C-alpha cells in the first residue's frame, strides 16, 4: 500500500484491495502500549495508519481503500463517512441496524463495535481502510483495549444470526464504497 501510494501520479487509478489477515494486532500511529492488556503469541505490528490498536484474523473482512481524495475533492472526514456508511448499508441488507459515532470512528450495533476504520493520507491519497467482523474468534480482542477504548465490546455478523462467507460480504461493502465515492464526488 505504501509503495503503491508513493509511486502514484495524477493519472493512477484508484484501487480497492480485499484481504483477510492471519491473526495479528495492529498498532496505529496514535497507539499507546498500555492498550495491550496482556501479551500473547499473536504478534503486535506497528503500522502507519491512524488510530490505536485492533485485531485482525481470518473471518474478518479487510478492505483497503487506495483513493486519490485530492483528485476527488474529498476530505478525510468525508472518506471516513463513506466507509462507515458502506458498512452500515451492508449490515442493513442483512437486517442489522448499525450506527456510526462521530466521537469514536467505526460502526456499532447496540454499543458493540462491528466495524473499524483506520486510514493514512499521503500525497493527497488514502490507504489502509476498514475491517468488518464477520465470523471469527473474537477472544483476542479481550487482550487489548480495542481502538483505545477501555471495556469496548465487539461483535460480529455470525453472533447476530448472519452466516455469510467473507468474500461474499465484500461485494456489498465494496459496491457501497464505490457508490459513496461517486455520490460524494458529485456533491462537491
Image (cartoon, rainbow, N blue to C red):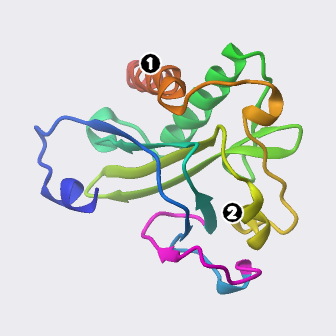
Q: Residue at x 45, y 20 (%)?
A: 175
Q: Nearer the viewer, mark 1 or mark 2?
A: 2
Along the line of sight, the residue nearer the viewer: 94 or 178: 94
Q: Is residue 118 magenta?
A: no
Judge left or right: residue 120 versus residue 77.
left
Q: Residue at x 29, y 52 (%)?
A: 124
Q: Quadrant of residue 109?
A: top right
Residue wearing tag 2: 147
Crowding at dot 1, Cα within 10 Å, few <14 / some 14-19 / many 20+, comes out as some
Vertical side of 134 occupied by 125: above or below = below
Q: Quadrant of the N terminus?
A: bottom left
Quadrant of res 37 = bottom right
Q: Is residue 94 left or right of residue 116?
A: right
Residue named by callout 1: 179
Q: Image point 65% across, 37% down: which residue?
A: 134
Q: Secondary structure at mark 1?
A: helix
Amino acid at each position: 500500500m505504501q509503495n503503491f501510494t508513493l509511486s502514484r501520479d495524477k493519472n493512477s487509478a484508484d484501487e480497492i484491495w480485499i484481504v483477510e489477515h492471519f491473526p495479528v494486532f495492529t498498532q496505529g500511529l496514535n497507539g499507546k502500549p498500555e492498550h495491550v492488556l496482556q501479551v500473547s503469541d499473536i504478534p503486535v505490528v506497528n503500522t502507519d495508519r491512524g488510530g490505536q490498536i485492533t485485531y485482525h484474523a481470518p473471518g474478518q473482512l479487510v478492505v483497503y481503500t487506495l483513493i486519490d481524495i485530492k483528485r476527488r475533492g474529498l476530505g478525510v472526514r468525508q472518506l471516513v463517512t463513506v466507509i462507515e456508511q458502506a458498512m452500515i448499508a451492508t449490515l442493513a441488507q442483512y437486517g442489522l441496524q448499525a450506527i456510526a459515532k462521530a466521537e469514536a470512528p467505526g460502526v456499532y450495533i447496540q454499543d458493540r463495535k462491528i466495524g473499524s476504520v483506520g486510514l493514512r493520507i499521503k500525497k493527497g491519497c488514502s490507504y489502509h481502510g476498514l475491517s468488518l467482523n464477520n465470523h471469527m474468534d473474537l477472544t483476542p480482542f479481550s487482550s487489548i483495549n480495542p481502538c483505545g477504548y477501555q471495556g469496548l465490546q465487539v461483535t460480529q455478523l455470525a453472533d447476530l444470526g448472519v452466516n455469510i462467507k467473507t468474500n461474499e460480504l465484500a461485494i456489498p461493502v465494496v459496491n457501497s464504497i464505490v457508490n459513496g465515492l461517486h455520490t460524494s464526488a458529485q456533491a462537491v
